[in-house]
Image: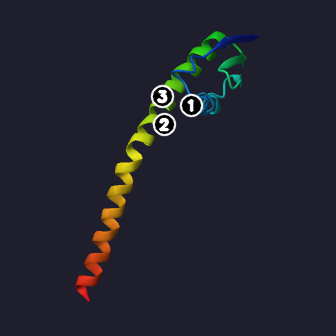
Amino acid sequence: MKFKSKADTSVYSLEALKLASYILDEWQFKISTFGEIEVDGENPEKGFKELLNEALNQQCRIDLASKNSKIANIIITKAVLSALGEKEANK
């Protein structure tokens, strides 16, 4: 059985939808660049709902990673500089 619908691309990025489709192996998903989704498998409506749920999870991860990447880089840089400073002080 097949089911076709559309995801709100203002909420879900194409990347999040694709990541979610890789995680859910009970259904086969075809995702267009415009957010149109075709679900194939048993109970495809459930598959569509599961896809949107997992896509929301992935979208949160993507958004958090992009917001926290700058601070993570600062922390890593300070840690490396601190470690280098400690080595030079011990010489």
Q: Quick check: marks 2 and 1 in contact, CB under 8 Å? A: yes
Q: Which residue appears at 28% of the width and 70% of the height?
A: 82
Disc 3 marks which residue?
A: 57
Determine whether the residue tagged by mark 1 lies in a helix, strand or loop: helix
N-term mark: 2 or 1:
1
Mark identifier at residue 61: none
Q: Quadrant where the N terminus lies?
A: top right
Residue 91 percent location from the top left of the image: 26, 89
Mark 3: give few (<14), some (14-19) or many (20+) Cα within 10 Å: some
Quadrant housing residue 37 = top right
Determine whether the residue tagged by mark 2 lies in a helix, strand or loop: helix
Residue 24 makes an appearance in the image? yes
Give the number of the mark in front: 3 or 2.
Answer: 2
Marks 3/2: CA–CA distance: 9 Å
Q: Which residue appears at 69% of the width and 26% of the height?
A: 33
Task: Decide which of 6, 45 is in the foreground and name it.
Answer: 6
Residue 61 percent location from the top left of the image: 46, 35
Q: Is residue 37 above or below residue 88?
A: above
Residue 26 percent location from the top left of the image: 66, 24
Give the number of the mark in front: 3 or 1.
Answer: 1
Inspect the image, locate mark 3, and give the three-letter code of the amino acid beneath it.
Asn
Marks 2/1: CA–CA distance: 8 Å
Determine whether the residue tagged by mark 3 lies in a helix, strand or loop: helix
Q: Is residue 39 left or right of residue 15?
A: right
Q: Is residue 2 left or right of residue 12?
A: right
Disc 2 marks which residue?
A: 62
Residue 43 makes an appearance in the image? no
Inspect the image, locate mark 2, and give the three-letter code of the amino acid beneath it.
Ile
Mark identifier at residue 16: 1
